[in-house]
Every structure is written in C-alpha cells, then in structure tokens.
Image (cartoon, helix red, strand yellow):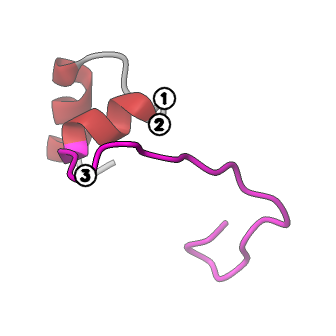
C-alpha cells in the first residue's frame, strides 16, 4: 500500500475538467462515494 511506502506499479488516473472542485464532488467523480451523504460519511469517518 502507499501508506506502507509501497506504491502499486500501475494506478488509475482521474482527470477533472473543472478548475475548482469540492472534495465531496472529487470523491464522487473518483468513484469512492455514490452520493454527497456517502462522501461526507467518508470524510467524517476519516476513511
């Protein structure tokens, strides 16, 4: 894992078109959250 100092050989890239984006929208666009509420839960839960 990246946290242990071992980055994967290949990582997916995400290109964002907007010049500014909220962390909630970023989590949704990256596929880590399916809704605003889900993204907020991830942030509050320090995921």
The mark that comes first in sequence, 3 or 2, is 2
Disc 1 on helix, strand or loop?
loop
Q: Which residue is mark 2?
A: 30
Q: Position of residue 30 (x, y in %)?
A: 47, 36
Classified by dominant secondary structure, the portion drawn in magenta counts as loop
Disc 3 on helix, strand or loop?
loop
Disc 2 on helix, strand or loop?
loop
Res 43 quadrant in image: top left
Res 35 quadrant in image: top left
Q: Is residue 4 magenta?
A: yes
Check contact, mark 1 vs mark 3: CB within 8 A.
Answer: no
Q: Residue at 16% across / 20% down in the picture?
A: 37
- Local packing at callout 3 (Cα closer than 10 Å; few below 14, some 14-19, many 20+) is few
Left or right: residue 28 versus residue 40 is right
Q: Residue at 36% across / 17% down in the picture?
A: 34
The mark that comes first in sequence, 1 or 3, is 1
Residue at the far right: name it: 9
Residue range in magenta is 1-23
Left or right: residue 8 versus residue 14 is right
Q: Which residue is mark 1?
A: 31
Q: Position of residue 26 (x, y in %)?
A: 33, 41
Check contact, mark 2 vs mark 1: CB within 8 A.
Answer: yes
Q: Which residue is mark 3?
A: 46
Q: Is residue 21 magenta?
A: yes
Q: CA distance from mark 2 to mark 1?
A: 4 Å
Check contact, mark 3 vs mark 2: CB within 8 A.
Answer: no
Q: CA distance from mark 1 to mark 3?
A: 17 Å
Q: CA distance from mark 3 to mark 2?
A: 17 Å
Left or right: residue 33 versus residue 11 is left
Q: Residue at 39% across / 43% down in the picture?
A: 17
Quadrant in which the N terminus appears:
bottom right
């Amino acid at each position: 894992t990246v946290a242990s100092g071992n980055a994967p050989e290949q990582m997916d890239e995400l290109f964002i078109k907007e010049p500014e984006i909220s962390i909630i929208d970023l989590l949704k666009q990256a596929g880590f959250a399916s809704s605003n509420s889900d993204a907020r839960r991830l942030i509050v839960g320090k995921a």
